[in-house]
Image: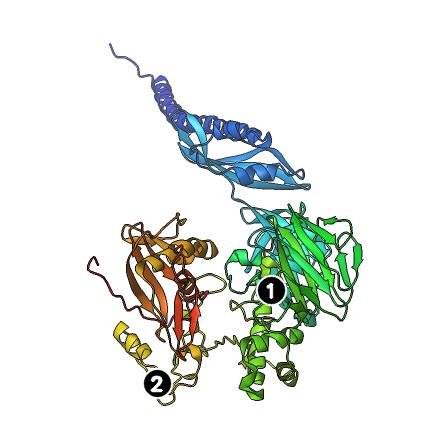
Amino acid sequence: MVRKKRPGRARRKRKKTKGSSKLILILLLILPAVLVFQGYRWISGEMADKAHLFMERVTASDRAGAARFLAEENLDLSELFSLFEEPEVEYVGIGTVWLSGLSGGWAEIKFSSAGSMLTAPLYLTRSGREWRVFKIPEVKTITGAFVRGEQDGLLKLYWGKEEKNLRAERSFGLVFGQAVNVRQVEDVAVLVKQLDELALSRLVRRSSTEIEGEREGVLPARKALPVYRVNMEQNLAEKSVGPGSPGDLNIGRENLIFYLYKGEIVAAKVEGPYNPRTIRVVLRQNLANLNQDGLQHSRLSLSGKTALYLEDKIGGVRHHFEAGLPVLIEPDGEKIRVIPAGGRPLVFSNRIWFSAGEGRISISNLQRSGWVGTPAYRGSLDIIAQGGRLLLVNELTLEQYLYTVVPSEMPLSFGREPLKAQAVAARTYAFKNIFSGRYSGYGAHVDDSVLSQVYNNNPEYPASNAAVDDTAGLVLFYNDTVADARFFSTSAGHTAAYHEVWSEPATGRFPSEPVTYLQAASQIPGEEIALKTEAQVQSFLERSDWPAYDAEAPFFRWQVEMSAAELAASVNYNLGSRFREQPDFILTRDGDRFHSVEISHNPLGELLEIRVIQRGTGGNVMVLELEGTNGSYRILKEYNIRFTLRPMQYLEGAPAVALERNDGSLLHNHSILPSAFIFFDLHRDEDG
């Protein structure tokens, strides 16, 4: 029997098999994609949920709650919290989520700032079954920025010494010359606040945390204050602004512009050059006490041959005191108590100012060796209470100041031309220091001791006044800059290099940057002296017949003999005060290194050894090491060495220490070692 073929059925069967295969293939292709998509949605949803929960804690200022979502405990959230605490900034939600794998990605934070919609990335990573935040948007606060302008979607700023260009999603309506605080997220300016502006009447004191105005009083100031210099001759064009420094905030300068945020000074602007008319001198009790406490007074007694006038410029109060009658001033906590002769005490919370018209003010409490009687001062005196003591500043014209600097620094017997040369050097030094900021924390430019130049230790004389008047206005320049006119009373026959004596004013680094015109040089005509080794220095200083320019000066050569016990007593007494004055330059040995650490009582103990560690090119000691039974120390810089090894008697009942000078004269208990051009000739007994 022959079966008939059924081709149609067979064909239908083949078609069914082919179609099923395609469907299965499509399903096999689609299913993973669906699974991946669903997994992506699920993972993205998890990430978005975690990001949202984290941001809810941020916007609720819940630091502990937000910290629970972090992958690392040390992630700093302070700037992010601060951003969303701003009333103009509002969290909107989580936008797009992007995966960078199965265990990481980032979510888009959506927020508004003053009505503008913005986004920022929040990075998350999987830790076990939990998503955690491992990186937040970079949020910065730029405080006290100077606006250069807005252009092409950019906000252009100066911030300190740095130019910044930030993207801006909208215009902030800013113009050149304004000062602002900026909230920056990534590279976008999201919030700008214009700062309050204050034109200061006159700057009378500046520290790292305070600004004091003559009529405004004390205002808190941010550390590392940005300062901007504006050249008014450029009509406030963009190129006329540049970075300045706190050193541009000169004491005595008027109409400085300060910018405040929440009552704190956060930036300053300086316009045009400063041409000082006066100099401010902080006065010491005794010119022999060169420590910081020498600037503090427990009591003052003022009088004048003419009437005295007192003014509290902040309180708007004035008082008048009769000529010839003493006025006592005492600290009263952080206030000032003024007691007129026969009158009722007056108490002031602000700085007070005394003047005597064209007369002078006598201060009976100050010890000045060149005066017979009470020293008197031209100009005005201003007084503040600080730490339960009084600070006293004398302000007068620069030329009047020089009237008592010149005779205090040079004997009148030197004659007219040397006195004129001294006047030019002193004027140059004073002018340079007006801009240095060295005594700005005291509200002054200089002090009245050898730490600046000696002022009013001797009264005025016609010869020295004539030298000042004959050179009025003359100062020394090096290229286009007023020179740093350092001078001394006597050399040992060789000068020292500036950078091997003084530290860098701005950074405190020692040795400092060399100054071209202040290098070590021989002061003996025709002689170049080698002073590299201890033997060479000793040979040079032991000889007193060098034909040097100042060979006849009493201090050209000197010597002092002290026992180990006397030297140790001097070090133990003075080392702590030197550390308080200059902690970076009094170093304590710890193992094989020296560090700046607090100096203990009786730090040296018994003296075992003195070592010169480093000398300058002129032979001056730069670093001295002292070894004792209680510790070893290195003293850096000339003045610290001279103030620590004072030729004074500190042992009770022992005779005064005698210092013999080149002319054979003796000085007893001299307040300071005369020079760092020294060598130590040590003699040991049988016990070493």
Closer to us: 649 or 25: 649
* Image quadrant where one finds the C terminus: bottom left
Q: What SS does tag 2 mark? A: loop
Which residue sits furthest left?
A: 686
Q: Is residue 375 visible?
A: yes
Which numbered disc flags the more N-terminal residue, 2 or 1? 1
> Which residue is pictured at 41% across the width and 57% down the height?
650
* Residue 429 image position (x, y, % from top left): 55, 74
State the image quarter where residue 421 is shown.
Answer: bottom right
Q: Which residue is mark 2?
A: 545
Q: Is residue 146 visible?
A: no
Amino acid bearing label 1: Asp
* Residue 155 image position (x, y, % from top left): 62, 55
Callout 2: few (<14), some (14-19), or many (20+) C-alpha neighbours within 10 Å? few
Q: Is residue 632 above or below residue 70?
A: below
> Which residue is pictured at 27% across the width and 53% down the height?
592
Q: Which residue is mark 1?
A: 248
